[in-house]
Image (cartoon, rainbow, N blue to C red):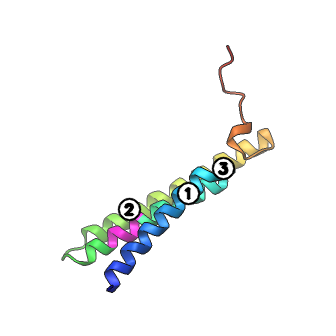
Amino acid sequence: MNNTDFIFYLGVLLFCCGLMIIFTKKNALLILMGIELMLNAANLNLVLFNSQQSGAEGQLFGLFVILIAVCEAAVGIAIILRVYHYYKSAVPDQINDLKEHG
């Protein structure tokens, strides 16, 4: 197994770990961390596939993905902190004031 295969399988493993975190954890911050892990795994594979071709389009797209991930994390943490301040809980299942009854 060469270096390219190892990095590809590492990206797949990180993506699967992020997906498992999203499906198993109940805390909103941990779900956000799982999403970030999935974005970073996809970004790792994107840069890996670009390294086998000439040009910098994949690396620029990877930089764009990192920028979007940082913005998503900042906004997500701000929303989670505001929800925690109001409801005193960060578990999405316990926040049910917006659900329709009836």
Under mark 1, the amino acid is Met
Of residues 85 and 90, which is closer to you in this image? 90
Percent of width and height locating residue 50: 26, 72
Q: Looking at the rendering, which quadrant does residue 93 occupy?
A: top right
Percent of width and height locating residue 88: 81, 43
Under mark 2, the amino acid is Phe
Of residues 90 and 86, which is closer to you in this image? 90
Q: Which residue is mark 1?
A: 20
Q: Which residue is mark 3?
A: 28
Q: Which residue is mark 2?
A: 64
Counting residues from the start of the chain, the first of labels 2 and 1 encountered is: 1
Say which residue appears at 33% left-offset and 78% top-offset.
5
Q: Which residues are magenta?
A: 42-47
Say which residue appears at 59% left-offset and 59% top-offset.
33
Density class for disc 2 (Cα within 10 Å; few <14, some 14-19, many ≥20) is few
Q: Residue furthest top?
A: 102
Q: Looking at the rendering, which quadrant does residue 43 occupy?
A: bottom left
Q: Name the secondary structure under disc 3.
A: helix
Quarter of the figure that contains the C terminus: top right
- Judged by its main secondary structure, the magenta piece is helix
Under mark 3, the amino acid is Ala
Q: Is residue 52 above or below residue 73?
A: below
Is 79 magenta? The answer is no
Does residue 65 appear left or right of residue 57 in this picture? right
Percent of width and height locating residue 72: 52, 53
Q: Residue furthest left?
A: 54
- Judged by depth in the image, the label closer to the viewer, 3 or 1, is 1
Say which residue appears at 49% left-offset and 67% top-offset.
14
